[in-house]
Image: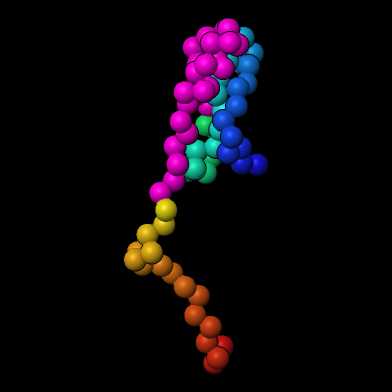
Amino acid sequence: MKNLVPNLRQRSDSFWEIVCTDLAIGMPQCRKTGTKDQAKAEKKLEGFKPTIADAPDSDAPRLRCRKDSSA
């Protein structure tokens, strides 16, 4: 499941981390906040800018499935 909105998660060692889906690779990513204080972690979340995937290049070569009538 893709989580496009970054959110906070508390780890087992009481530190907070920012969790979101990295659109460049399509996988969930975790960023350490380096704090055990939730208020400080929320301030770091406000300044967090997730990476955004580039738009596909319309001029780039692509593979297409050709539908042959003789198949």
Residue displayed at 53% across by 83% down = 67
Closer to us: 3 or 43: 43
Quarter of the rendering occupied by the C terminus: bottom right
Quarter of image, res 7? top right
Residue displayed at 49% across by 43% down = 23
Report whether residue 13 is seen.
no
Residue 60 image offset from top left, x and y in percent: 35, 64
Report whether residue 50 is seen.
yes
Residue 31 image offset from top left, x and y in percent: 49, 24
Q: Is residue 43 magenta?
A: yes
Residue 24 image offset from top left, x and y in percent: 45, 43
Closer to us: 54 or 10: 54
- In the figure, 26 relative to 40: above or below? below
- In the figure, 50 relative to 65: above or below? above
- In the figure, 62 relative to 20: above or below? below
Count of labels in the image = 0
Residue displayed at 57% across by 7% down = 36
In magenta, the rendered stretch is 30-54
- In the figure, 59 relative to 40: above or below? below
Residue 20 image offset from top left, x and y in percent: 56, 33
Quarter of the rendering occupied by the N terminus: top right
